[in-house]
Image (spheres, rainbow, N blue to C red):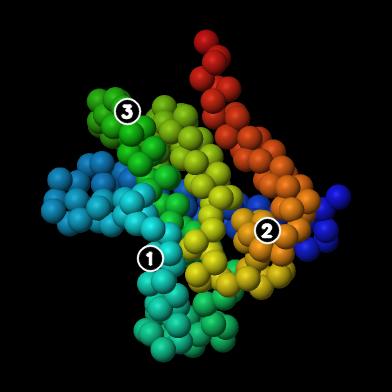
Amino acid sequence: MLSASAWQAVGLTLQLAAVTTLLLMLLAAPLAWWLHHSRSLGARIIEVCVALPLVLPPTVIGFYLLLAFSPNHWFGAQWLSATGQPLAFSFSGLVIGSMIYSLPFVVQPLQTAFAQLDHKLLDMARVQGLSLWGRGKHIILPLCARGFIGAAVLGFAHTLGEFGVVLMIGGNLPGETQVASIAIFDAVEGLNYGEAHRLSLVMLAIAVLAIAPLYLRRSRP
């Protein structure tokens, strides 16, 4: 059986993945739509920035986020002034870092889905007076449903496996910032291979359950 602290790490990981995915879907959908349609240089620069987590070492991202989250820097100081809580080594800091690190895994599938959308339908709906909200609800969302599901699954699954970024900006505070990947690392460092094995199996099962629906949908006619 897993220890209480290990289950706590699993729960925190699931909470982090859920919150990050929800916020990412709200942010990434309009961002992906704009990146797909815009031909400006600014859009291409932002697209490069969005894709950086795919190639940068997580520790590089984590290091610069840790500096930005510090009360000695503008962003961290503004957060501390607004909330009364430091951003570094907090769950809020983990969420922001996870959103940045997982952003391309959500934006890029949505861009692909929007690229496959028949825009003539949107033009016809606009001519007939359907509002932007109506076009999104009745045309974009149903036709791009697989893209939205895929983006959410990839964002959730990617957040489950984070290590470098969350360790750099969150440290290893049990019950506050210690996610499952860090708990496994701790168990291995402490030569507690039994605990590491059991926790790894739990995370393996969660990961399979998270991504299986995405691939099982493809087997349907």
- The span from disc 1 to disc 2 (Cα, nearest Å) is 24 Å
Tag 1: amino acid: Val
- The span from disc 1 to disc 3 (Cα, nearest Å) is 36 Å
Say left or right for 124 vs 163. Answer: left
SS at mark 2 in the image: helix
Q: Nearer the viewer, mark 1 or mark 3?
A: 1
The residue depicted at 45 percent of the width and 83 percent of the height is 70
The residue depicted at 60 percent of the width and 69 percent of the height is 91
SS at mark 3 in the image: loop
Tag 2: amino acid: Val
Does the residue at mark 3 contact the one at mark 2 (Cβ under 8 Å)? no
Say left or right for 170 vs 56. Answer: right
* Residue occupied by mark 1: 60
Q: Earlier in the sequence, mark 1 or mark 2?
A: 1
Crowd class of label 2 (few under 14; some 14 to 19; many from 20; radius 10 Å): some
Which quadrant of the figure has residue 112? top left
Q: Earlier in the sequence, mark 1 or mark 3?
A: 1
The residue depicted at 76 percent of the width and 47 percent of the height is 198
SS at mark 1 in the image: helix
> Measured from the top left, where is residue 60 in percent x and y?
38, 65
Tag 3: amino acid: Leu
Which quadrant of the figure has residue 61? bottom left
> Measured from the top left, where is residue 128 in percent x and y?
30, 30
* Residue occupied by mark 3: 117
Crowd class of label 3 (few under 14; some 14 to 19; many from 20; radius 10 Å): some
* Residue occupied by mark 2: 188
Does the residue at mark 1 contact the one at mark 2 (Cβ under 8 Å)? no
> Measured from the top left, where is residue 135 in percent x and y?
37, 36
**Which residue is outermost to the right?**
1
